[in-house]
């Protein structure tokens, strides 16, 4: 079987889908890897490293596509790129199919078998393939560093000749992978950390990284399918807003991370709540790409409102391209191992991971959530 990796063409994207180490292991399992020249250079992997690992480096994307039956990417293809894919071939990438409905339709029209890495079911068997968790780890870590860089005070408590300096108070909204990493990183930097989540079962995890868990006094469980959070009742939202308001007002840093699959990110921080924060406080909105958890967030921009700094980064993993590519590549390597055998792709529709992440196949849009959004 032959697979290909192209240079990512989305603005600001520095990751590569497969690193040389993974190419070497795939070659030993009978999978030939073709790489577009320069595909890994932005993340620290030179063409010669791929060649030494047994991959074939070709000078253009066109030449690479002609050689293979499967294309592996980090980000979704553009509509123009999707139109150039070989009919009947396989695409594996982050697809964001609920946002990129036009691309899904193109893939179906061209009879592309498309697998969405961002929709791999979050089950125990798929943990080693979980791209979202891997990238969220980096996003949570980097968000705290951005906050520390923008904040006008120290994170740790310091006892100096000029007196004692109080530690920064950090509030993390959402205790998924990104939120827990944000808690752990802020704690390591010396901050006093609190975290909120609608799922009561994450309390122990929050406490295990040294943060205090903030609970809404309502008997309602926010655990949804696949390990994600679900949308809550209106009563819960009202009590949640009241509680969060109290904690936001006394926080120096707020890092919201809440996402609901297939939907715009829920607004957790209103303009009034931003007004209540001390001048110089910082919000780093990890959910900016999906609209943001703060009402004032602007994707890829830094907003200063009511003397509060609001950062809206949309691709934090790309800022740490060496390690994010390493993690992404290992996830893809395990995923390929699950999807394929000696004869190529198994296309086992009874397999939860295969069926759960397959978006289009043989001209049909298969994924239930995507079909509902398209009205099919």
Image (cartoon, rainbow, N blue to C red):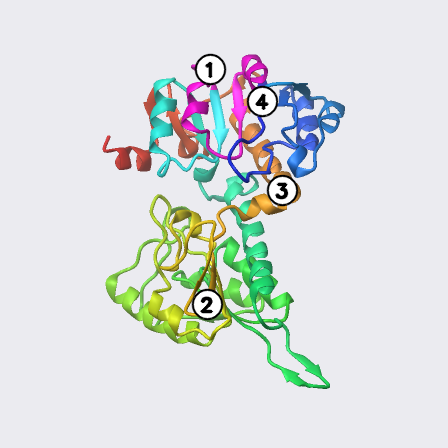
Q: Which mark sits nearer the N-terminus, 1 or 3?
A: 1
Q: CA distance from mark 4 to mark 1?
A: 12 Å
Query: With respect to residue 341, does 180 lie above or below?
Result: below
Residue range corresponding to the magenta coloring: 61-89
The answer to whether mark 4 and mark 3 are in CB contact below 8 A is no
Q: Which mark sits nearer the N-terminus, 3 or 2?
A: 2
Question: What residue is shown at x 64% (from left), y 66% (from top)?
Answer: 188
Q: Which residue is mark 1?
A: 86
Q: Which label lies toward us, 3 or 2? A: 2
Q: Which residue is mark 2?
A: 308
In the image: residue 342, left or right of residue 231: right
Label 1 residue SS: loop
Label 4 residue SS: strand
Q: CA distance from mark 3 to mark 2?
A: 29 Å
Question: What residue is shown at x 63% (from left), y 23% (from top)?
Answer: 35
Question: What residue is shown at x 46% (from left), y 15% (from top)?
Answer: 86
> In the rendered structure, does residue 72 fall within the stretch colored magenta?
yes
Q: Which residue is mark 4?
A: 4
In the image: residue 192, left or right of residue 223: right
Q: Badge 1: how crowded within 10 Å, few (<14), some, or many (20+)?
A: some
Query: With respect to residue 157, does 235 lie above or below?
Result: above
Q: Which label lies toward us, 4 or 2? A: 2
């Amino acid at each position: 079987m032959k697979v290909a990796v192209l240079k990512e063409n989305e603005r600001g994207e520095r990751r590569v889908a497969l690193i040389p180490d993974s190419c070497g292991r795939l070659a030993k399992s009978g999978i030939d890897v073709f790489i577009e020249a320069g595909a890994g250079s932005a993340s620290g992997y030179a063409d010669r490293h791929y060649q030494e690992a047994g991959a074939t480096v070709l000078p253009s994307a066109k030449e690479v596509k002609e050689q293979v039956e499967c294309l592996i990417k980090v980000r979704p293809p553009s509509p123009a790129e999707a139109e150039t894919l070989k009919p009947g071939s396989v695409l594996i990438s982050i697809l964001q199919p609920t946002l990129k409905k036009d691309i899904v339709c193109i893939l179906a029209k061209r009879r592309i078998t498309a697998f969405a890495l961002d929709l791999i079911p979050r089950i125990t068997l798929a943990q080693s393939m979980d791209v979202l968790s891997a990238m969220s780890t980096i996003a949570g870590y980097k968000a705290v560093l951005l906050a520390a860089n923008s904040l006008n005070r120290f994170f740790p408590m310091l006892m100096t000749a000029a007196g004692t300096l109080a530690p920064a108070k950090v509030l993390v909204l959402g205790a998924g992978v990104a939120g827990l990493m944000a808690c752990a990183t802020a704690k390591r930097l010396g901050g006093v950390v609190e975290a909120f989540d609608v799922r009561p079962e994450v309390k122990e995890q929050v406490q295990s990284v040294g943060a205090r868990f903030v609970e809404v006094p309502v008997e309602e469980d926010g655990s949804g399918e696949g390990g994600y959070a679900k949308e809550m009742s209106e009563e819960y939202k009202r009590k949640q807003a009241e509680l969060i308001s109290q904690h936001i007002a006394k926080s120096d840093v707020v890092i919201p991370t809440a996402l609901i699959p297939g939907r715009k990110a829920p607004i957790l921080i209103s303009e009034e709540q931003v007004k209540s924060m001390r001048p110089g406080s910082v919000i780093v909105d990890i959910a900016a790409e999906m609209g943001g958890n703060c009402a004032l967030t602007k994707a890829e921009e830094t907003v200063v409102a009511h003397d509060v700094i609001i950062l809206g980064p949309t691709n934090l993993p790309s800022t740490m391209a060496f390690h994010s590519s390493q993690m992404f590549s290992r996830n893809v390597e395990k995923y390929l191992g699950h999807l394929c055998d000696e004869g190529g792709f198994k296309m086992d529709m009874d397999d939860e991971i295969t069926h759960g992440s397959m978006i289009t196949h043989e001209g049909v849009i298969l994924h239930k959530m995507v079909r509902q959004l398209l009205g099919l």
